[in-house]
Each structure stands twice: as structure tokens, then as C-alpha cells.
Image (cartoon, rainbow, N blue to C red):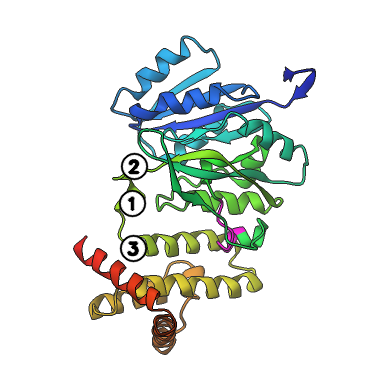
């Protein structure tokens, strides 16, 4: 263990998946090197990069023996994280995406929280930065007001884990107990799935300080997605997360309520496309997972879901002209995309 000013500090390994992120990987590693509490190892997992990112890491490792570069073929983000977890040896593991960075005090403050053994993981508030590293002050990642980071709230998506992987620190042994990241999933909800399974072993904790910086590129996957695609991804993620607890009747009732909101977020883009409306009905009604099939019972229930969604939208427009303007602007933006 490291010692700092006479205090024993539990050691931490940092895991950084790397795929074609040469412009930013040096900054990510430097933010780990500059932590007030030194980390034990900086494990960079090269997931089949075709740029010079791995070379940059190799050169940095010559001057810092804590840096471990693991090379391999492209297998996806979850597989890269799992490879890093297996190569780790510290009591705690912290994740960092290759284009994100940490504030110097992040690890110190997270370890202080985790000294209370009841938490499954800790995460921090996060700010967005642009491709040059400058803060985008208008973007501050926030949790849902009054939603505590409990197991139920996390698995229902009521409590989003802000900063996602780049802000999370947890115990290594708990990751194995939870089953590691699901390498079969590539839907964008792998993180949510992991945090829910971790939270089954204890509540999470949010440090309400922006100790993580998330890089937002103009052409990033999230920004290039249409609203409909994001809605579909959200719904798919919810179903995959819920499948772990399909025998929990109380949870499934609440899951259905939240999933119907996500289903409407998809449906509103299909109202003028009858063929796709029918296809979406079939997708839900015949879903492989019970957590998907429970969303609607039959065609009448499907029609009810659409009707209620239309009513709620109309009500919000009537009550707020600004909402009408917002929805129209969003619709026109999607039409141009």
C-alpha cells in the first residue's frame, strides 16, 4: 500500500480501454499520473487500435513503470475492460475512457467514501470538455432530482450514474462477484447493466463535485445519433438490464411503467410511418425477453400506449408554448438529419 503523510492508503489500479484515441490518450494517462493519491497500476488495454495511440502509451511506459500496455484484437469496450480487470491486482479499480480525464483529487475523495464498506461503488459529478480540453460550461451532468443511488433506482434507470465508467471506483472482488461486464452486449447500455449488478451488493454513492471530465466530440457517436435511435437504444438497454430480475414481480411492475415511457419515446417518431408502427408492435409483443414482452399485452394495449402518449404531448403543448416550440424545432432538426 502507498503511504501519504503517514497515512496508509489502499491501492487502486486504473483501467483505460484504448481504441483509436491517439489525440487524447496522453492526457488521460497524465490525469491518472497526477492524482494526489498515487495509483498502483495504469492498465491500458489496446483494443485493436490502428492509430499511433499504443505507441504513445509504450513511450510513456518507459518513464513510468506503473503503466502496463495490453495489446489485443478489437473485441469491444466490455471485453477490454474485463481484460484490464483480470490484469489488475489492487483492492480497488477505477475506470477511465481514453478520451476523458480526472481531476487530481478524484481518487483521494473516492477512497475516503469507500472506506465505508457498505457502498458497492462511488462515482463523481462530471463536466464536459471539448476536443481541446476546454470546459463546456453549459453542460453539467446531473442526476434526477431526489433520486437516491439505491439498487432499485439504478436498475430502473431512475438514478443515472453520471460520468458513467470514467467516474466510477469500485472493489475489484465485487466486479468478479457481479459477473464483470457483459461482453455479448454492444448496445451502449453495458455500463448501466454493470452498475445495476454492482448495486445489488450495496448502494452507490455520488460525490457531488465535478471530479471527472467527459470529452464531447462534435462527431461523437452520441451526438450523431438521431433522437429515435437514442430512444431505441435506451429502451433496449432497459430491457437487457431488467432481464436479470424477471422473476421479481414488484420490480417488473415498475419496470413496465418506465419501459412504456421509453417505448413512447420511440413511437412518437413512427406515427406517420404505419409499416414501422406495426413492426415495432411485433418487436415488443414477440420480444425474446420477458422484460420486453411485458411492455404491451396486445394490440389494444399498444393503441392505449399511443393514445396516452399523444394526450400527454398535447397537454404539455397546450400548457407551455415553449414546449410546442421545442418539440417543433426538434422535429424539424430530425427531418434535416
Q: Which residue is mark 3?
A: 227
Q: Looking at the picture, how far across and down is residue 179, in whole percent?
A: 59, 45
Q: Is residue 57 left or right of residue 204?
A: left
Q: Residue at x 33, y 61 (%)?
A: 229
Q: Residue at x 37, y 64 (%)?
A: 232
**Is the residue under label 1 in contact with that under label 3 (CB below 8 Å)?**
no
Q: Is residue 130 left or right of residue 292?
A: left
Q: Which residues are magenta?
A: 154-161
What predominant SS class does the magenta segment belong to? Answer: loop
**Is the residue under label 1 in contact with that under label 2 (CB below 8 Å)?**
yes
Q: Residue at x 33, y 63 (%)?
A: 227
Whether residue 288 is visible here, answered yes or no, is: yes
Q: Which residue is mark 2?
A: 217
Q: Earlier in the sequence, mark 2 or mark 3?
A: 2
Name the residue furthest bottom. Answer: 300
Q: Quadrant of the N terminus?
A: top right
Q: Looking at the picture, how far across and down is residue 301, in whole percent?
A: 44, 86
The residue carrying pointer 1 sits among few (fewer than 14), some (14 to 19) or many (20 or more) residues within 10 Å by Cα, namely few
Tag 2, which secondary structure? Answer: loop
Badge number at residue 56: none
Query: Vertically, is 129 above or below 309?
Result: above
Magenta stretch encompasses residue 158: yes
Q: Which residue is mark 1?
A: 223
Name the residue furthest left. Answer: 336
Quadrant of residue 130 in the image?
top left
**Is residue 250 or residue 170 the one in the foreground?**
170
Tag 3, which secondary structure? Answer: helix
Q: Looking at the picture, how far across and down is residue 79, in whole percent?
A: 46, 38
Magenta stretch encompasses residue 45: no
Q: Looking at the picture, how far across and down is residue 27, in whole percent?
A: 44, 26
Tag 1, which secondary structure? Answer: helix
Amino acid at each position: 500500500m502507498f503511504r501519504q503523510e503517514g497515512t496508509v492508503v489502499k491501492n487502486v489500479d486504473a483501467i483505460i480501454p484504448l481504441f483509436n484515441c491517439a489525440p487524447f490518450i496522453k492526457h488521460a494517462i497524465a490525469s491518472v499520473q497526477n492524482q494526489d493519491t498515487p495509483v498502483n497500476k495504469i492498465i491500458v488495454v489496446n483494443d485493436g487500435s490502428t492509430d499511433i495511440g499504443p505507441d504513445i502509451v509504450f513511450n510513456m511506459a518507459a518513464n513510468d513503470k506503473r503503466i502496463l500496455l495490453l495489446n489485443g484484437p478489437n473485441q469491444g469496450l466490455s471485453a477490454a475492460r474485463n481484460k484490464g480487470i483480470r490484469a489488475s491486482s489492487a483492492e480497488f479499480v477505477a475506470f477511465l475512457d481514453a478520451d476523458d480525464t480526472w481531476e487530481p483529487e478524484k481518487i483521494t475523495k473516492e477512497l475516503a467514501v469507500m472506506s465505508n464498506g457498505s457502498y458497492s461503488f462511488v462515482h463523481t459529478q462530471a463536466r464536459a470538455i471539448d476536443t481541446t480540453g476546454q470546459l463546456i460550461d453549459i453542460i453539467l451532468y446531473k442526476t434526477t432530482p431526489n433520486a437516491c443511488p439505491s439498487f432499485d433506482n439504478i436498475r430502473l434507470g431512475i438514478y443515472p450514474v453520471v460520468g458513467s465508467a470514467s467516474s466510477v471506483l469500485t472493489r475489484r472482488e465485487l466486479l468478479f462477484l457481479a459477473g464483470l461486464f457483459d461482453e455479448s452486449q454492444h448496445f451502449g447500455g453495458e455500463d448501466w447493466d454493470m452498475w445495476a449488478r454492482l448495486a445489488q451488493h450495496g448502494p452507490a454513492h455520488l460525490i457531488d463535485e465535478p471530479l471527472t471530465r467527459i470529452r464531447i466530440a462534435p462527431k461523437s457517436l452520441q451526438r450523431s445519433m438521431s433522437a429515435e435511435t437514442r430512444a431505441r437504444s435506451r429502451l433496449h438497454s432497459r430491457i437487457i438490464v431488467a432481464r436479470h430480475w424477471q422473476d421479481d414481480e414488484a420490480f417488473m411492475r415498475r419496470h413496465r411503467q418506465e419501459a412504456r415511457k421509453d417505448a413512447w419515446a420511440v413511437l412518437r417518431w413512427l406515427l406517420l410511418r404505419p409499416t414501422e408502427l406495426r413492426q415495432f408492435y411485433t418487436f415488443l409483443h414477440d420480444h425474446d425477453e420477458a422484460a420486453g414482452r411485458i411492455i404491451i399485452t396486445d394490440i389494444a394495449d399498444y393503441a392505449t400506449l399511443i393514445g396516452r402518449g399523444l394526450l400527454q404531448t398535447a397537454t404539455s403543448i397546450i400548457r407551455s408554448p415553449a414546449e410546442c416550440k421545442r418539440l417543433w424545432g426538434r422535429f424539424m432538426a430530425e427531418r434535416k438529419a
